[in-house]
Amino acid sequence: MWQNTSKMTTAFWNKLIDRLDKLDSGSVQTQFLRLAAERGLLETIFHALREGILVLDGEGRILYANRGACRLLGLDEASASGQLMHRYMRDIDWAGLARLDEKEWARLSNREIEISYPQHRFLAVYLAPLENPAEGRDSGVVMILRDVTQERDRTAEVVESERLNAILMLAAGVAHEIGNPLNSLTIHLQLMNRELRKVPPGQGEALQELLDVARSEIIRLDHILSKFLKAIRPSMPNFDHQALPDILAETLETLAAEIEDRNIRVEVETPDELPTAWADHDQVRQAFFNVARNAIQAMAGGGVLRISFVSSDRLVGVAFQDTGRGISPNEMGDLFEPFRTTKANGTGMGLMIVQRIMRDHGGSVMVDSLPSGTRIQLNFQRDVQRIRLLSAPPPPTAGGEGA
């Protein structure tokens, strides 16, 4: 590929040739050896860079591409030279770049593009005109590519985390404000109950019954608010060794009445040996409760909830698969958005809380809408992560490459 860059170094070679008659054969050999060594050094440096570096001619044809560029764009290093850049970045007029004025160069000199091959990436692209002194005009383009996918993902995570925290703070504030009138109602009911005791026997039984119902409902609302605040308040997990099947059993026991009422059959598949997770017991139970309850409510006419466990060298997970109607593509995009729900009485907070719990655990949530329902898998970090060693290659045989 370096042979193609000779067009851009014509002036240098002309000067060198002009001086050849003034050098003896030994000096000429020394100069060429030095140039070869410097070229080899520069080539090694360019190939070692993670950034992609390309040199294009005036028609957008690749004259040189380092290994970083080949990796980012899926180029074949051996055949990259001579290919048109238009095949890989179609939204840039490569042939017209050499004719653009300074304002156009400033607009295009630094931008971000999205590519899908060889894998989905976001690339920061820097373009600069390459002058050819021999021809006296702009005759090419230098392009530098940098993978900014992880930077964009980190930025998106920060924005999402800040938005989630703001919503949680708002929800906590609303719950707190609801709690204040509930406390006031409780006090007034106590005063009413005290006054009711002064009523002659046989005259206040009906009022006492109504008073007891109102007091029990206020206690129930206060309990719901307490659970809600505990679920949404951001708190660091209290990590410990946790057996996920045991936490699942506790969760299903809590939901037993609703499962029976909705005519749901629960099938749990537990492997003989399952590693423990490094997790917070209460938060894991909250995540299991939210996912399982969503699955139960998705099967209004009854169905089957299949729960299975998976594990790898680094993760241990639980998969919940229902036989409900599934999730449409439009709903999938808003799945973790707060206050987005398809239920008549839903709050849209359940899966958002699950996502926050899994993020705090360094885990992940995987959602698949299947023809026969929805599958949600929660992946947690293993308490002891295995390190798998690669087997050593076999020793070379006689007469082979290693001989």
Image (cartoon, rainbow, N blue to C red):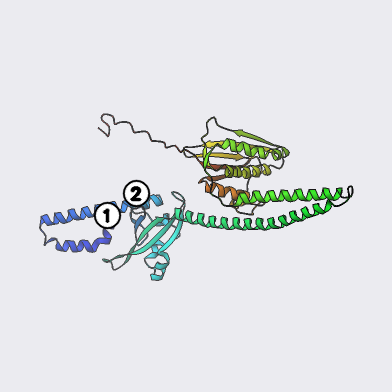
Q: Sort mark 1 into few (<14), some (14-19) or many (20+) by Cα contacts within 10 Å.
A: few
CA gap between label 2 and label 1 equals: 17 Å
Kind of residue at disc 1:
Leu
Residue 32: which quarter of the image?
Answer: bottom left
State the SS at label 1. Answer: helix
Q: Nearer the viewer, residue 306 or 120?
A: 306
Q: Residue at x 53, y 36 (%)?
A: 310
Q: Nearer the viewer, residue 279 or 213?
A: 213
Q: Position of residue 263 (x, y in %)?
A: 71, 37
Q: Earlier in the sequence, mark 2 or mark 1?
A: 1
Split into 4 quadrants, where in the image is the C terminus?
top left
Residue 61: which quarter of the image?
Answer: bottom left
Depicted 393 relative to depicted 143: above or below: above
Q: Which mark is residue 42?
A: 1
Mark 2 = which residue?
77
Which of the two marks, 2 or 1, is nearer to us in this view? 1
State the SS at label 2. Answer: loop
